[in-house]
Image (spheres, rainbow, N blue to C red):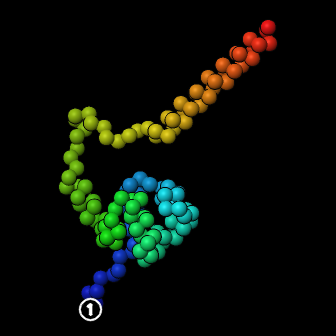
Amino acid sequence: MNTASKPKHIGRNISRIRELRGMKQEALAMAIGVSQQTVSNIEGSETIEDVLLEKVSEVLNVSPEGIKQFNEETVFNIINNTFTDSSSNNNNYLCSINPLDKILELYERLLKAEKEKIEYLEKLLKDK
């Protein structure tokens, strides 16, 4: 019987940490200066170069050793043991809006207002 443990799959660990951080492959790719396809390849690799692991670890805010030793079961045990249901005190820590959508909406409203001002000024000039 062989009791040697299977080596950790570094790419899978990166993928799970990225997902737990709420980050998409595209965002990670942009942050480390590679394509989304490269990130997909990294996440499919059992091992990656130390230099690349260092870059990824900085973006994910996890040490390279933390990525190597990542254990999903441990993470969920910690969450289960430290999370308490606070639904009765109305603390809502989950953001239900996307800030980028709100910024885009504000920008579009400002742009529309500027266009209306320009139309109004052009109308005034034609009337003279």
| Residue most extreme to the top | 128
Judging depth in this view, the residue of 125 and 103 nearest the camera is 125
Can residue 56 be seen in the rendering of this structure? yes
**Quarter holding residue 92:** top left
Query: Does residue 113 appear left or right of residue 59 in this picture?
Result: right
Instruction: Note whether 96 is above or below 111 in the view shown.
Output: below
Q: Which residue is mark 1?
A: 1
> Residue 4: x, y in percent?
28, 86
Q: How many marks?
A: 1
> Position of 35 compared to 51: left or right?
right
x, y percent for residue 101: 51, 38
Q: Amino acid at mark 1?
A: Met
Residue pictured at 34% horizontal, 72% vertical: 68
| Image quadrant occupied by the C terminus | top right
Q: Residue visible at 38% across and 40% down?
A: 95
The quadrant where residue 13 appears:
bottom left
**43 and 58: which is toward the camera:** 58
Residue 77 placement (x, y as % from top left): 23, 60
Q: In what quadrant of the picture does the N terminus appear?
A: bottom left
Characterize the local packing of mark 1: few (<14), some (14-19) or many (20 or more) Cα atoms within 10 angstroms. few
Horizontally, is 90 left or right of 44 in the view? left
Element on which disc 1 rests: loop
Tell me if residue 11 can be seen.
Answer: no
User: Vertical placement of 47 versus 89: above or below?
Assistant: below
Is residue 14 placed above or below 83 in the rendered structure? below
Residue at 74% from the left image edge and 11% from the top image edge: 124
At 54% from the left and 64% from the top, the residue drawn is 34
Where in the figure is residue 63, as x and y percent of width and height? 33, 65
